[in-house]
């Protein structure tokens, strides 16, 4: 059976016309706030800027939550979603918000390579080097990890990753059958990767308050301004 791929959406896209199979159950304000970083469909009746788009909903990303509102990214900037806007008695009706299924690639990524155990004949004498047969397994694991990084970069739509190789080297003192003192190298390796997913959130903090200095406490405080006082920023 072939899996049906969900469309790939981005903030600012016009969502498809309503289809229960795509939209599913609408979200509450609390459920939206719990979906930081995820995409949502939001009713166009509330977002006037999408009147020229032939769609029932717009695609936005949940980027931040404050005490009074949720910050959404509409592709061109940030907008605020207030709890009151989701109440049935506001503006003669209320708009709905739905979850967007996780973004999927149009092309399925290649299967992740599985590191294979490597056995290489060891000569009587070899240089203690990363290129020697002694480190054959390390090289095989590193090669498999490099293939896996490329697969993950493509699947996550990212252009940057880092690969870290950590070696722990120890010396074990023992003796052989001839009772000679022998030093055995013990080398363990650990390979880890990190995929960089580029994302950016911009905002601004403001309010009806002024910054004052408390000399007694030696710190700065915020003091609210009267509602009827108007200020001009220059």
Image (tube, grey):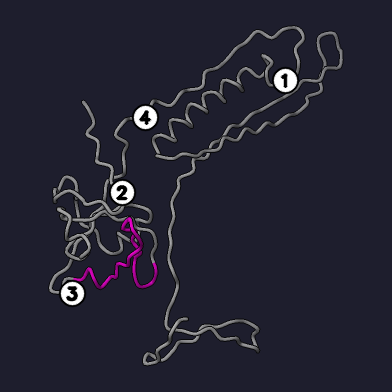
In the rendered image, residue 179, in percent from the top left (x then y), is placed at: 86, 12
Disc 4 target residue: 109
Q: Are marks 1 and 2 in contact (CB under 8 Å)?
A: no
Q: Nearer the viewer, mark 3 or mark 2?
A: 2
| Start-end of magenta stretch | 66-87
Q: Quadrant of residue 133?
A: top right
Disc 1 target residue: 129
Tell me which label, 3 or 2, sits earlier in the chain: 2
CA gap, disc 1 and disc 4 = 35 Å
In the rendered image, residue 11, in percent from the top left (x then y), is placed at: 31, 53
Q: What is the secondary structure assignment of the residue under circle 3?
A: loop
Please tell me how many numbered marks the rendered image carries: 4
CA gap, disc 3 and disc 1 = 73 Å
CA gap, disc 3 and disc 2 = 29 Å
Q: Nearer the viewer, residue 3 or 45?
A: 45
Disc 2 target residue: 10
Q: Are marks 3 and 2 in contact (CB under 8 Å)?
A: no
Tell me which label, 1 or 2, sits earlier in the chain: 2
Against 51, residue 105 (above or below) is: above
Q: Which mark is residue 179?
A: none
Q: What is the secondary structure assignment of the residue under circle 2?
A: loop
Crowd class of label 1 (few under 14; some 14 to 19; many from 20; radius 10 Å): few
Tell me which label, 3 or 4, sits earlier in the chain: 3
Q: What is the secondary structure assignment of the residue under circle 4?
A: loop
Looking at the image, residue 175 sits to the left or right of residue 42; the answer is right
The residue lying at 50 percent from left, 85 percent from top is 210
Disc 3 target residue: 90
Query: From the image, which quarter does the N terminus lie in?
Result: top left
Crowd class of label 4 (few under 14; some 14 to 19; many from 20; radius 10 Å): some
């Amino acid at each position: 059976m072939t899996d049906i791929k969900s469309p790939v959406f981005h903030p600012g896209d016009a969502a498809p016309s309503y289809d229960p199979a795509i939209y599913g159950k609408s979200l509450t304000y609390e459920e939206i706030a719990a979906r930081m970083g995820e995409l949502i469909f939001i009713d166009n009746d509330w977002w006037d800027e999408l009147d020229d788009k032939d769609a029932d909903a717009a695609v936005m990303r949940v980027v931040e939550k404050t005490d009074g509102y949720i910050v959404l990214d509409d592709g061109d900037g940030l907008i605020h979603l207030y709890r009151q806007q989701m109440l049935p008695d506001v503006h003669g009706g209320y708009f709905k918000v739905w979850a967007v299924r996780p973004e999927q690639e149009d092309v399925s990524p290649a299967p992740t390579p599985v590191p294979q155990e490597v056995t290489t004949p060891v000569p009587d004498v070899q240089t203690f080097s990363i290129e020697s047969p002694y480190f054959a397994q390390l090289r095989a694991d590193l090669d498999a990890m490099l293939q896996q990084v490329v697969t993950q970069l493509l699947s996550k739509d990212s252009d940057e990753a880092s690969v870290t190789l950590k070696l722990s080297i120890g010396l074990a003192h023992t003796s052989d059958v001839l009772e000679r003192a022998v030093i055995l190298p013990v080398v363990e390796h650990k390979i880890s990767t990190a995929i960089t997913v580029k994302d950016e959130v911009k905002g601004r903090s403001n309010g009806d308050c002024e910054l004052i200095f408390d000399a007694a406490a030696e710190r700065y405080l915020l003091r609210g301004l009267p509602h009827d006082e108007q200020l001009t920023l220059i």
